[in-house]
Amino acid sequence: MGNKILLEVRGLTKIFGSRTVVDRLDLRMEEGDIYGFLGTNGSGKTTTIRMITGLVHPDAGEVRIGGFDLKSQFKAAISLVGAIVENPAFYPYLSAYDNLKLTANLLPGVTRKRIDEVLDIAGLADRAKDKVGTFSLGMKQRLGIAGALLNRPKLIILDEPTNGLDPQGMRGIKELIAQLAAEQGISFLISSHLLHEVEQICTKAGVIRKGKLIAEGEIRQLLATGVETVEIVTSEPDKAEQLLRTATEVISISRSQDQLTVQTYGDCSFKLNQLLVTSGVQIRTISRRPQTLEQFFLGITEGDGGP
Ligand SMILES: Nc1ncnc2c1ncn2[C@@H]1O[C@H](COP(=O)(O)OP(=O)(O)OP(=O)(O)O)[C@@H](O)[C@H]1O
């Protein structure tokens, strides 16, 4: 395995109309990583994955897979990737085998033997001849992973793979991911809005919020990372908000009359205080509430359904 860089994303940006949905995003995966891409609904995960898989053109930034530039060396870069973006689509009246044969026809050099192999790996060998319409959602997801394995990728990208699955289906997917990583050295980029799920499967994670990567690292280290809620009461809330939005540590600001509630990455209340005071903003009170990223993430997933 080693520490070879498998995926490098730099400054990736997507703007829809006047909204910046993905904002100068950087990601870095090494071979062997199972990377959890964590964020609430609408935070920009699917758009990022679509850019990494060449389905959406970025407005800025670059993606390199296995050292190949996705734009100028598309074939070489994309041949290293197997991906399921959103739900895998199958023909319900065709068998699992025939569905994979259709996928295989689009890929150069994939043999019939390989179709049997991937069905076996996904634990579907004995259902190969059954119509996909009779499959549970978990089996369809495993069939999707089988399809993604056809061209022997080094990186598999899964967008919310356990969405809608029952506990047994979830377990099946998690076990398959762990097995493919351990036995075949395949790396995974897995998007999810569920912290505990990422914690169970992944070795590393990045947290995306409003299109920005707000934290990245080894899971354990990441969950212990400090995040703070700073509450500021001021007679000049407009000016204060404008100034605070320029600070890199600020994740979000909400307002209620003359009170600003500011979420920050790391301990920076002193810096924010100075920023306001040196610009002549009078502060009535300032208080801080430290949290771990885990508490923060659980709080935002409960509290707001979107960005
Ligand atoms: N083609 C598009 N045109 C305009 N806006 C879009 C388009 N695609 C996505 N968006 C918007 O971009 C934002 C991010 O969407 P995205 O699907 O990337 O988020 P997500 O984190 O994957 O969320 P979810 O888990 O709900 O899929 C959303 O507000 C969405 O409405």
Image (cartoon, grey):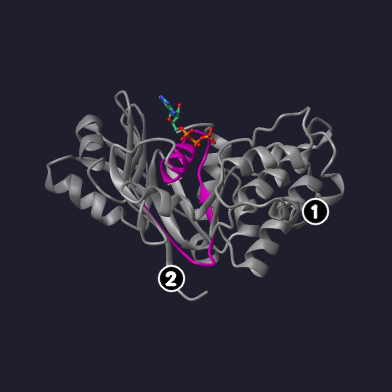
Q: Secondary structure at mark 1?
A: loop
Quadrant of the image occupied by residue 307 = top left
> Mark 1 or mark 2, which has the lower sequence index?
2
In-front residue for pair 199/36: 36
Residue under label 1: 123
From mark 1 to mark 2, how far is it between C-alphas?
30 Å
Residue beneath label 2, please?
A: 4
- Quadrant in the rendering for residue 118: bottom right
Magenta segment includes 34? yes
Q: Is residue 266 left or right of residue 82?
A: left
The reply, left or right, for residue 181 in relation to residue 276 is right
Q: Are marks 1 and 2 in contact (CB under 8 Å)?
A: no
Q: Amino acid at mark 1?
A: Gly
- Which region shows up in magenta? 26-53
Q: Position of residue 276 (x, y in %)?
A: 19, 45
**Residue furthest out toward the bottom:** 2
Residue occupying the point 56% across, 46% down:
107
Compared to residue 9, the image places residue 225 above or below, namely below
Q: Is any part of residue 229 visible from this angle? A: no
Q: Position of residue 67 (x, y in %)?
A: 37, 61
Q: Is residue 11 above or below residue 221?
A: above
Label 2, secondary structure: give it.
loop
